[in-house]
Amino acid sequence: MNLHKRFATVAMTGALIGGGLLATGSATASTPGEAVAQSCYGNARTYTKAAGTQIYPNYPTFFYLKTTSSCADINIKTNTNRYVKVCFLVTGGGRNCQADYKLTTADSWKVIATNVKDNTQYQFHFRSDAKSTGSYAS
């Protein structure tokens, strides 16, 4: 993950703990890496990719998803095992897709692309055109 984002998350967590604003118990992170993951996955969104297409999001919108400052990586959690890669919108038009698909395991988070700049536009490209549901965080 991006060192700058990791440091900011750890610093904010430390400030909250130091100020007594963070509750104790099982909901708190025990390591800086867990704090980053909770922040990233806490902003996750659900998706439903229709059968008959390999791209999400796709018809009828053809929109792209956009990375945020919450995550340094693009992550997906599919409800069934799927092969997925990311295609990025290229300035001036067109797409640039990763060469290889990554296997996601049902109900587990998988990092598909690492160290992606904030506000980068992208789509998920699935190897299968079967319906797929799950969550993503970026």
Image: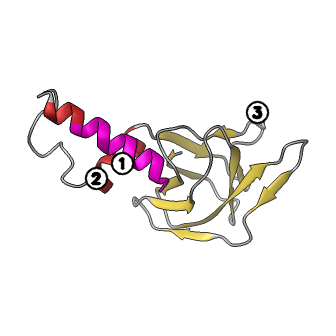
Q: Which residue is denoted by mark 2 in the rendering?
A: 32
92 vs 124, left or right, is right
Residue in view at x 65 percent, y 39 percent: 65
Q: Main secondary structure of the magenta part?
A: helix
Q: Residue 133: x and y, percent?
A: 53, 49
Tell whether position 89 is magenta.
no
Q: Nearer the viewer, residue 80 or 45?
A: 45
Q: Which residue is denoted by mark 1 in the rendering?
A: 36
| Earlier-in-chain disc, 3 versus 1 | 1
Of tags 3 and 1, the one toward the viewer is 1
Measure the alpha-carbon separation of dots 3 and 1: 31 Å
Q: Residue 71: x and y, percent?
A: 48, 45
Figure colour scheme? secondary structure
Residue in view at x 70 percent, y 59 percent: 129
Q: Is disc 1 surrounded by few (<14), some (14 to 19) or many (20+) residues within 10 Å?
A: many
Tell whether position 11 is magenta.
yes
46 vs 116, left or right, is left
**Mark 3 residue type:** Thr
Secondary structure category for the residue under label 2: helix
Secondary structure category for the residue under label 1: helix
Q: Is the residue under label 2 in contact with that under label 1 (CB below 8 Å)? A: yes
Q: Is disc 3 surrounded by few (<14), some (14 to 19) or many (20+) residues within 10 Å?
A: few
Q: Which residues are magenta?
A: 1-14
